[in-house]
Amino acid sequence: MSLRSRHIQGHSLSSSPVLGVVVRAQTYKNLLYLALTFPLGLFYFTLLVAGVPLGVTLLSVVVGLPVLIGVLVVSDRLLVFERWLACRLLDRSIPLDRDTETDDWRDYVRQPITDLGTWVGIAYLAAKFVVGVVTFVVLTVLFVLVASLLLAPLYYDTTSLGFYLTGPVNFSLSYVVQFWDGAAVITLPFTITSWQVTTLRGALAVSAGGAVLGILSLHLCNLLARVQGWLTTVAIRPRPVDVEFPF
């Protein structure tokens, strides 16, 4: 097989709406972004939970105000990082920073305070912990399930692999056929029982099902990444408000 034919086959596979998800680089960028959601959300949540109450508690001794301003400025820089991450991994178009460039340290304090986007972004940072937990659960369940099905031929004879029920499940589908002189009822009974993989052929069938589930899981992860990218685009953007400060 020539290099040109391999390139054509690879291009045709990547353009497939179903199977292309396996070979497209964007799929794995989305997975990386989803994998980072939980640790980043945990870090943001810890910062806000520790910093905001500490600053409020110390307001009576004046030190609390600098602490709160520090948390606000750090959160603003974290929002810049979130914008960068979404642009690099999710291919989103989000302004990475404000248009004003200055070397005055006071502007670094004024800009986050007078930008409504900072306050919306702080709510986004706090909510990212919940989103991260849900994403972590989804990724873990899908990975474990797909991996266990794909690797079934390697361990089917050493463990009880199958589908188990406490007892048979019986149900039926009925259809009424109308005639000129009456009607007839056609009933199709079904019974679902436990099923255990005992042969290599059955294990290969389970593995094939795992491959199908893996492809569907990648599509689901891409959809989840697109939803998170949209939320990031909506929540994280500069919303400057004209406010005069005495400093």
Image (spheres, rainbow, N blue to C red):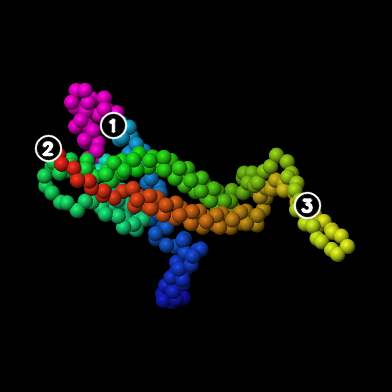
Is there a contact, CB below 8 Å, between mark 1 and mark 3? no
Q: Which disc is residue 246 wearing? A: 2
Mark 2 burial class by Cα count in 10 Å: few <14, some 14-19, many 20+ = few
Q: Main SS type for the magenta part?
A: helix
Q: Residue 200 at what x, y percent from top left?
A: 64, 55
Q: Is residue 23 visible?
A: yes
Circle 1 residue: 52
Residue 55 on the magenta span: yes
Seen at 29% across and 28% down, the residue is 53
Cα distance in 3D space between marks 2 and 3: 81 Å
Q: Earlier in the sequence, mark 1 or mark 3?
A: 1
Range shown magenta: 53-74
**Label 2 sits on what residue type?**
Pro
How many labels were placed on the picture? 3
Q: Is residue 137 left or right of residue 173?
A: left
Front-most of residues 225 and 108: 108
User: Disc 1 vs disc 3: which is toward the camera?
Assistant: 1
Say which quarter of the image contains residue 51: top left
Mark 3 burial class by Cα count in 10 Å: few <14, some 14-19, many 20+ = few
